[in-house]
Image (cartoon, grey):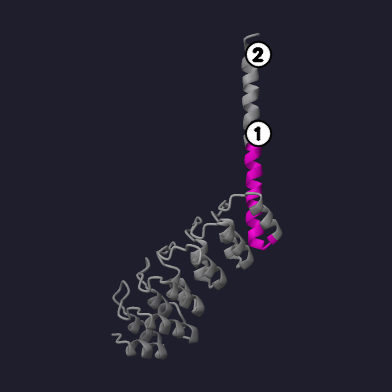
Amino acid sequence: MLKTKPLSLALLTLAGSFMMISTNEASASQADQAFIAAAESGELRALSNSISSGQPLNVRDERGRTPLLAATHANQVDSARALIEAGADVNAKDAIEDTPYLYAGARGHLEILKLTLANGADLSDTNRYGGTALIPAAERGHVETVKTLIDAGVDIDHVNNLGWTALLEAIILGNGGERHTEIVRQLVTAGADVNLADNNGVTPLQHARQSGYTEIVAILVQEGAR
């Protein structure tokens, strides 16, 4: 009996340690999730308190999102600014390979995009489709976003996993309207290769003609497209 007491005490101590670790981890997880929720909902006081208390800036939720990416999803500009100024990573990827920079570009969240560009955004970074921020921005008709990314120096002729450049995607997935026409004009003016074909050998001009986008056709022809 005397020999079992030290063993029993050791086991109890070990069990207590595990309980303390589990409790601490649960508390940390709750704090992390509250931090992310405050960022996404724009609760600036709660967000500021989390930052001031030393809460790690790049914690993750179940989707791999950091507080900054959650704020970017909701286009919470003030939340994003506070987090970036505190040092949050603008290139931190989630489970589907989005970053605050890439998502802001793709969704046309221009103010947040500019904040990421001013704070270390990786212009060569790509999304799950192998595309830069410029390609989905061109597809979705985000005129000012496209201009901002071109001015920042993003590779205009980058080819994604589908074999499309920003120019091709603006034509193939665009609607030929005013915004997509302006984006084609911007890309061409910035030096996009008007003859860079897709994986099937179809050029931007051929796609534009097939879709009946007469104004885009005229822009391309003027630049020597074939």
Determine whether the residue tagged by mark 1 lies in a helix, strand or loop: helix
Judging depth in this view, the residue of 45 and 185 nearest the camera is: 45
> How far across and down, in percent of the image, does residue 205 sit?
34, 84
Judging depth in this view, the residue of 178 and 58 nearest the camera is: 58
Q: CA distance from mark 1 to mark 2?
A: 22 Å
Against 4, residue 158 (above or below) is: below
Judging depth in this view, the residue of 191 and 25 nearest the camera is: 191
Q: Where does the C terminus fall, quadrant-wise?
A: bottom left
Q: Which amino acid is tagged 1?
A: Met
At horizontal 49% and vertical 67% (from top left) the residue drawn is 117
> Main SS type for the magenta part?
helix
Give me the disc on residue 20.
1
Against 208, residue 112 (above or below) is: above
> How far across and down, in percent of the image, does residue 209 sit?
36, 87
Is residue 35 within the magenta segment?
A: yes
Within-10-Å neighbours for mark 1: few <14, some 14–19, many 20+: few
Q: Which amino acid is tagged 2?
A: Lys
Q: Who comes first in sequence, dot 1 or dot 2? A: 2
Q: Is residue 68 left or right of residue 207?
A: right
Q: Where does the N terminus fall, quadrant-wise?
A: top right
Query: Which segment is the magenta one?
Result: 22-44
Asked whether residue 139 is in view, the answer is no
Q: Is residue 48 left or right of residue 194?
A: right
Give me the disc on residue 156.
none
Asked whether residue 6 is in view, the answer is yes
- Which residue corresponds to mark 2? 5
At horizontal 54% and vertical 54% (from top left) the residue drawn is 64
> How far across and down, in percent of the image, does residue 8 sit?
64, 18
At horizontal 71% and vertical 59% (from top left) the residue drawn is 45
The picture quadrant where one finds residue 28 is top right
